[in-house]
Image (tube, grey):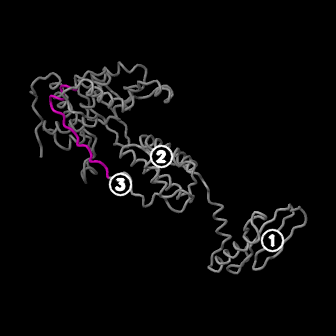
Amino acid sequence: MRAGKPVAKSDGAGLTFTLSEAGAAAWILRFSLGGRRHELTLGRYPDLTLGAARKLAAARRVEVQQGINPAAVMRKEKARKDWTVRQLIADYDSKVMPSLAVSTQHSYSRNLKRIQSGIGALSVRDVTAGDIVGQIERVKAGWVELFTLWCVLKAIFKHATGKKVIDSNPCAGVVLESIIGKRPEVRKRLMLSDDEIHVLMSAKMSDENRLSVCILLATGVRISELMNARREHLFLDEARWHIPSSKTGPAIDIPLAPVVVEWFRALDGLAGDSAYILPARKQRRFDNAGGDANVSKDALREAIDYWIDVHKPNVRRYTPHDLRSTMKSHMRALGVPRDISEMCLNHKLPGVEGIYDVHTYYPERRAALELWASFLVNCQSSKPWNVTPLKRTA
């Protein structure tokens, strides 16, 4: 079409052929709805032929008869973002991820990369429940990791519905158990025996790993709390370790028995210039953290597994978390009251008591932990237990 004078020729029933001054030709449908005049561009000529324009105009007139404004529908559709899943992930990463706990960010980032490599190129609008199922089935991982992947998929598409990129979440109705089966039975926690405690406290590991095991056993802290411990939070002259609040629990001061102070001093002497009591052992972690980093919590698990697999000690296979259950169980046997043993593990007291009882029970916890440390020292030396247990209370 040549540029020149604008042209508008009616084909009847509101269908109009138009030609702009610049020479752009298009089919326009003019219609009335609600007492107002409207126009809808059906398509450009010659891409849209006369026959195709007539069929499309007829379909749009049916919508008008049903009270639907096709022009308004088109405007809304154009305003809606047509993102790829990769673009959605980038937006979620910038707007939502910073508000999540650090540990959650790590697990979510790992699975966002999986999603990006799997369905990242798809348009968010085109993703179906079948695509979600396929994404989960493609990943070869354990039940817990696949559960996290499922949660991440639901989260990013919930983000998309919140931004009205899509109207409904394609994860709706997808049942994880139908894809990967029911969750395997959760492994029961161990209570290591006196003999097993004797063996593991003298384990043939590096000093860092053996002392870490002893400290975990003596304090009952979570492995992440020890692996992330900063030297500035250790007040060894006061026999106190401050653990800041995190998603796993509120801030707490851990009273340290004399032998535990000695173990921490030994670790402190091995920490070099790091701000962490347990610095990273791989240069890559230092580089990724900009020059300083704590040891990975997987390092201790791997060290325990290696010790058991290679040295074949007379100890049942255990995890760092089993050391918490071991402490809890033995404390009860030593006469430590249930509420004090729970508070030593930084567990919140149940019910109304947990709401109104704000006392930290620091002296009581110190007595309990020193009693427990004395028990451990006796186990380590294989001496008979001759310390009077705490008096049991109801």
Q: Locate residue 213: give its quadrant.
A: top left
Circle 3 residue? 177
**What type of secondary structure mainly makes up the magenta span?**
loop
Between the residue at mark 3 and the residue at mark 1, the CA separation in whole angstroms equals: 56 Å
Residue of label 2: 99
Q: Position of residue 324 (x, y in %)?
A: 25, 37
Q: Quadrant of residue 187?
A: top left
Helix, strand or loop status at disc 1: strand
Which residue does the image show at 15% across and 30% down from the upper left? 194
Q: Residue at x 26, y 29 (%)?
A: 256
The x, y position of residue 279, in whole percent, is 40, 25
Between circles 1 and 2, the one closer to the viewer is 1
Compared across the picture, whether 332 is left or right of 81 comes to: left
Look at the image and give the residue range highlighted in magenta.
Answer: 182-200
Residue ID for mark 1: 17
What's the mark number on residue 131? Answer: none
Task: Please state which amino acid type lies under the numbered disc 2.
Answer: Ser
- Describe residue 2's horizontal placement relative to residue 373 as left or right: right
Within 10 Å of disc 1 (Cα), the crowding (few <14, some 14-19, many 20+) is: some
Q: Earlier in the sequence, mark 3 or mark 2?
A: 2
Q: Quick check: 344 above or below 48?
A: above
**Image spot of residue 299 (x, y percent):** 36, 29
Q: Nearer the viewer, residue 299 or 133?
A: 133
